[in-house]
Amino acid sequence: MRDRYEPQAFESSWQQKWLDSDLFRTREDEGRPKFYGLDFFPYPSGAGLSVGHCRNYIPTDVICRAKFMQGYNVLHPMGFDAFGLPAENEAIKRKSHPAPMIDQYAANYQRQMNLIGIGYDWSREFKSSDPSYYKWTQWIFKLLYDRGLAYRSNAEVNWCPKDRTALANEEVVGGLCERCGTPVEKRAIPQWFFRITDYAQRLIDDLDDVDWPEGIKNQQRNWIGRSEGVEFQMRVQFSIAAQEPHPDDLEVVEKPHSFRVFTTRIDTIYGMTFCVLAPEHPLVAEIKKRSTPEKAAEIESYQAKSKSLSDMDRQADNREKTGVNTGTFAINPATGKPVPLFIADYVMMGYGTGAIMAVPAHDQRDFDFALKFDLDVIPVFKPESSYLSANETTEAEYLANPKQFKDVFSTKEGILVNSGEYTGMSYAQGSAAMGEWIEALGIGERKVNYKLRDWLISRQRYWGCPIPIVYDKDGNAETVSDDLLPVELPAVDNYEPADDGSSPLSRIPEFVNTTTNDGTLGRRETDTLGGFACSSWYFLRFCDPHSPDEAWNLDRIKYWMPVDCYVGGAEHAVMHLLYARFWTKVLYDAGLVSVKEPFQRLMNQGQVLGYTPYRAPRHGETLGVGEDGILVSFAEAAQMDESDLTWKWVRMSKSKGNVVTPEEAVENYGADALRIYELFVAPFEQNVQWNNDGMQGAVRFLSRVFRLIADLKPHWNPDWRSMIAFTPMDGKAKDIRRATHQLVAKATDDIERFAFNTYISAMMTTLNTLTDLTKNLENPTESEKLALSEAIEFFLTVLSPAAPHSADELWSGIGEQGFTYHLDWPKADAELAAADELTIAVQVNGKLRDTIQMPASASNEELESAARSSEKAASFIDGKTIRKVIVVPGKLVNIVAN
RNA sequence: GCCCGGGUGGCGGAAUGGUAGACGCAGCGGACUUAAAAUCCGUUGACCUUUGGUCGUGAGGGUUCGAGUCCCUCCCUGGGCACCA
């Protein structure tokens, strides 16, 4: 048999045998528990997979293979997220049509995944652009519509001028298009939204029920942004001289000239010295009407200016506060006194009520504004001593003139001052009491606000799922009836987007012109759904992928959902995961799925980084934002002086030219070597630096496995199982069995914990141990042969998920039939795994002074007396009195002496 | 600014409060070879007065018989969010 790892000789033939025998076909056998392992839905890029992508697929494959061997029915499917902007943009660039292009790319992905031996059930594969799939995307859209969760609105949206489409809030990062980096503009175009805000609280609450990385849960909570506070009404007074405050002013409820504010710090209301409206606030129109022409013009010009600012400009760091004093006043309900009313762009129309009460003494933004416009600052909290000492001041000095310090005192500690009857209360007492007071007064109520906005889902692009809506002649929307689904995307040659916000579909009369449900002339909705709609339910379709008559059969969902282990990159922390959770909850409410949360356990793999050359900018060259060097191609770098180059570890990507493909890795080292390397090189969640020496190490390990098994083959007895329990263990048999069972215990636990690096290292350790134990074992005893046979079988079983080609090759090499995938995962016998002699540490005052060999059965008393008689330890006790002896069974003895 | 991670040999990393550095990479020495590669064996935290000892997990404190691990303060670093009231 083979005694070296020669991947070219056997890996592809095993892949063919797996395919021929339909090895990974999903089973639903009676009496076996289920396991659903899933990778994030990939968009098949033309660049193909890199070894970076493999870091996602290999670990999922290991856990799915292990689960199958452990007796589970395993669902491990793969499909392709084919609709959407990336595919369409690439097709435009290549002057081809996205449909055939995507077919070709997906086939390439599938080939590459097979090349590294991933055990997918390809019979369940689909693309989100298949009409048989998006028919049901449309059907779910209708469900959302019917439940009042999909609506069309003329809101101002984020428009990407390069992609020529509207974007969801989540797709805008720092005012730039997340995909292409173009600054987004504001445009008022009618758009479709999903009412995800209705589910905000449940999306927070149910995070408690899933086993996800805390960081991701936090990001979601952060994005949803729940905050508790008080919303109340404030009366407007158009002139300071108009009137003295009147008791009636405090009872204003629905008078025409008032506005509402939201605050999380109602306890600071006595410190309110001005109010601010967002420039877009509807009350501003009324204010302009009542202002002098000069003031109205000033307000008007400020509004125009803030409208012209992009989100990016408006959010720029350390931006000076700007605003306009409207000359109008608002009545502080706590004091009854008027405070000036401003408009300023640091208040956003999109959050809360678009208006705030400003408390400059305890809010940095309000404080900065107050300094700029020379407004009163009234402290309502006694500052903490740490604040006073940091500003080298005293309480009296601070309370007398808080404006002289550059930072505000903004914690929730301290005692209220200057707050009427509430003076002397703590933050907690004050906010509770004032909240009740506002409610009793009838001008407001305690309220919860969320930062989360509704999900903008329409795109003015061709390559997406058509929205199943038809408008009648009066423009009323109705849904397309189920029997007319899917609304198919027409095949066209020219599908380029337009600048005017209209969809390419709107220029196709055969598509647009249709009839309504009552047979009159109708006009189709021509926007398409953003790609995130398609990926919000694919994990459900995988449970029942080819049903022509329904999206899925509920029994299949009940059987397979939730996904037990969902693996993908942390960059989808908010968007995809939030949307998929939302759809699942809607479908749960409709009784169509059995789970509230789709993904029970989530794991984020680290990225693979490539060593990439950069150089300093030359004369006349400028660096982009966030860059500190200019990318150099590898060919260029080879020509340059090493001292002119800076090498950095950056994520592998085609644009960086630092990609290693699975083809290269498999050709040079082998598929199993790639799998072992990626599992071993670092903890699963951590980024890794690609290193060919490490790949060579994996090859070496596999070769040593081949050699060991080939050496042991003469001792292989396939019937070891029936004999081993009745044969007394002599010679090295016990040590061999100990190593074997220790490996089984460790590997089983490590795979479950996603600790693949220590799973591999446990196999390496066991390999070393077995190699040592069998070095001079020419004529093993009967029991040693049986122990070695157990070791061979269990080692290959445990190796199989990580290096399945090698495991199968070795299994057949020792003369066995079939696949290691069909072997039963062994159960570790704790008794066999336990050592009968242990090394016990002897410490004096917590420092290691000696180690002693003791039988595992030794009592605490025996351990203590053996430690006391250690000569090495004794020299550290000489002249001291033993105060205490601590015995940790199986570990150590610590003698405390002074 | 706020919220999460993370700082351990030359490198990647291992360690339920109990012998820090498993396993691997690189290095060094040796065997085999005409030679090299491959392979195998040994060795490899630092320092010292070397059959032994001292120091050592970003820094400083603390809890404990005992701290990489728990607590407090700080530094560095990666990521996310951010005029969100």
Image (tube, coloured by chain):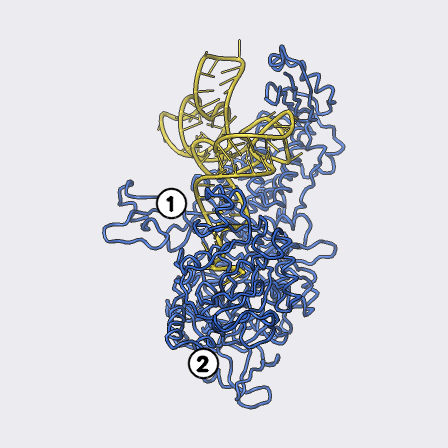
Chain colours: A blue, B yellow
Q: Is residue A124 visible?
A: no
Q: Is residue A298 left or right of residue A816?
A: left
A536 and B44: which is toward the camera: A536
Badges 2 and 1: C-beta atoms under 8 Å apart?
A: no
According to the picture, the residue beneath numbered tag 2 turns out to be A506
Helix or strand or loop: what does disc 1 sit on?
Answer: strand
In terms of sequence position, does the residue under pointer 2 or pointer 1 come before the other?
Answer: 2
Q: Residue furthest top?
A: A879
Helix or strand or loop: what does disc 2 sit on?
Answer: helix
The part of the image, by quadrant, that contains residue A865 is top right
Question: What mark, if any, has residue A648 been given in the picture?
Answer: 1
The part of the image, by quadrant, that contains residue A543 is bottom right
Which quarter of the rendering shows the N terminus of chain A? top right
Which quarter of the rendering shows the C terminus of chain A? top right
Tell me the residue at 64%/60% (across/down).
A597
Q: Residue furthest right?
A: A726
Q: Is residue A433 above or below residue A284?
A: above
A651 and B49: which is toward the camera: B49
Q: CA distance from mark 2 to mark 1?
A: 48 Å
A630 and A348: which is toward the camera: A348
Identity, as a three-letter code, of the amino acid under mark 2: Ser
Chain letter behind tag 1: A
